[in-house]
């Protein structure tokens, strides 16, 4: 027989933990002195203790460990529990790898530019959205090509929506599609699910599970540094762009210096 102290040393656990296992019925001592309350353990009980430790290391709760050891869990249930734990661990590893990639990318940015970025890229999901829109073609992605196209499109879109009695249900949302010799510019604004097109198009834009976003502040004529920063972040972090670039116009006060526009790039693994 071993005293609780000696048994704890052999099992590489604390005396406090053994007392806790006793209290919850997970590992009862072989003998308890009725006068002193001292607990004693048999050497064979090390096998159960080792199984407790092994199952805990796999991430099972003590309640689950007890059910497994007492054979209250069938083989199929145990297989399911292990597969679930496997999936949880794989997801945790993937999340840690993504964080590590982010740290490495941030280090490269600091080494390349000598400073921290003023705005952070955030990856998030976006829901499907219905927009009323008008479209046109620009010669390229730079503001000198986009601005002369998109501004008249929005002015005309708002005029047509008002004439049709349609009230926007959300902010403006523009998106851009690559063409062989230019860019297809879609000037849209969120509308309700019941809106149908008349002299404007109504498009249901898809939801995305992962979109890299960066907040641009100020005039869209000055957007290119943030567009390029977002593109570098996507490349540095091991992603690729999956869909058309989007711009969500969050705030557009009269002072363009106070504009807030969220740049959005749907992404997936490279």
Image: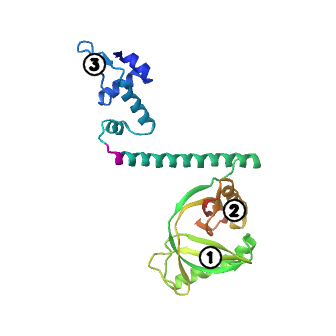
Q: Nearer the viewer, mark 2 or mark 3?
A: 3
What is the number of the mark on residue 186? 1
Across and down, in percent, residue 104 comes to 67, 46
Q: What number of labels is visible? A: 3
- What span is in magenta? 73-77
Q: Residue under circle 2?
A: 227
Q: Residue under circle 3?
A: 31
Across and down, in percent, residue 7 comes to 39, 19
Picture residue at 44% right of the left edge, 39% below the top: 59
Note whether 154 is above or below 125 in the view shown: below
Residue 179 in which image quadrant: bottom right
Q: Magenta stretch mostly in which secondary structure?
A: helix
- Sequence-wise, the earlier of marks 3 and 1 is 3
Asked if residue 111 lies in the magenta stretch, the reply is no
Note whether 104 is above or below 226 in the view shown: above
Across and down, in percent, residue 193 comes to 45, 76
| Residue 252 shows up from this direction | no
Calculate the distance from the C-alpha at mark 2 to the C-alpha at mark 3: 72 Å
Across and down, in percent, residue 209 comes to 53, 61
Calculate the distance from the C-alpha at mark 3 to the C-alpha at mark 1: 79 Å
């Amino acid at each position: 027989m071993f005293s609780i102290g000696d048994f704890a040393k052999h099992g590489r656990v604390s005396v406090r933990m053994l007392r806790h296992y006793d209290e919850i019925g997970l590992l009862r001592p072989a003998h308890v002195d009725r006068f002193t309350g001292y607990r004693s353990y048999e050497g064979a009980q090390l096998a159960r203790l080792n199984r407790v430790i092994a199952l805990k290391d796999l991430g099972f709760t003590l309640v689950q460990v007890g059910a497994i050891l007492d054979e209250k869990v069938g083989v199929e249930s145990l297989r399911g529990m292990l597969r679930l734990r496997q999936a949880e661990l794989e997801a945790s590893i993937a999340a840690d790898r993504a964080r590590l990639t982010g740290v490495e990318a941030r280090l490269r940015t600091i080494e390349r530019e000598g400073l921290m970025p003023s705005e952070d890229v955030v990856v998030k999901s976006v829901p499907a959205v219905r927009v009323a829109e008008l479209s046109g073609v620009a010669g390229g992605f730079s503001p000198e090509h986009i601005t002369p196209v998109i501004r008249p499109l929005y002015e005309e879109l708002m005029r047509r929506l008002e004439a049709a009695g349609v009230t926007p249900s959300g902010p403006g949302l523009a998106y851009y599609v690559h063409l062989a010799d230019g860019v297809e510019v879609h000037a849209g604004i969120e509308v309700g699910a019941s809106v149908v097109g008349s002299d404007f198009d109504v498009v249901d834009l898809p939801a995305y599970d992962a979109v890299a976003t960066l907040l641009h502040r100020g005039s869209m004529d000055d957007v290119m540094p943030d567009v390029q920063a977002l593109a570098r972040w996507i490349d540095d972090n091991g992603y690729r762009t999956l869909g058309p670039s989007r711009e969500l116009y969050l705030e557009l006060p009269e002072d363009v210096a106070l504009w807030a526009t969220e740049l959005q790039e749907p992404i997936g693994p490279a």
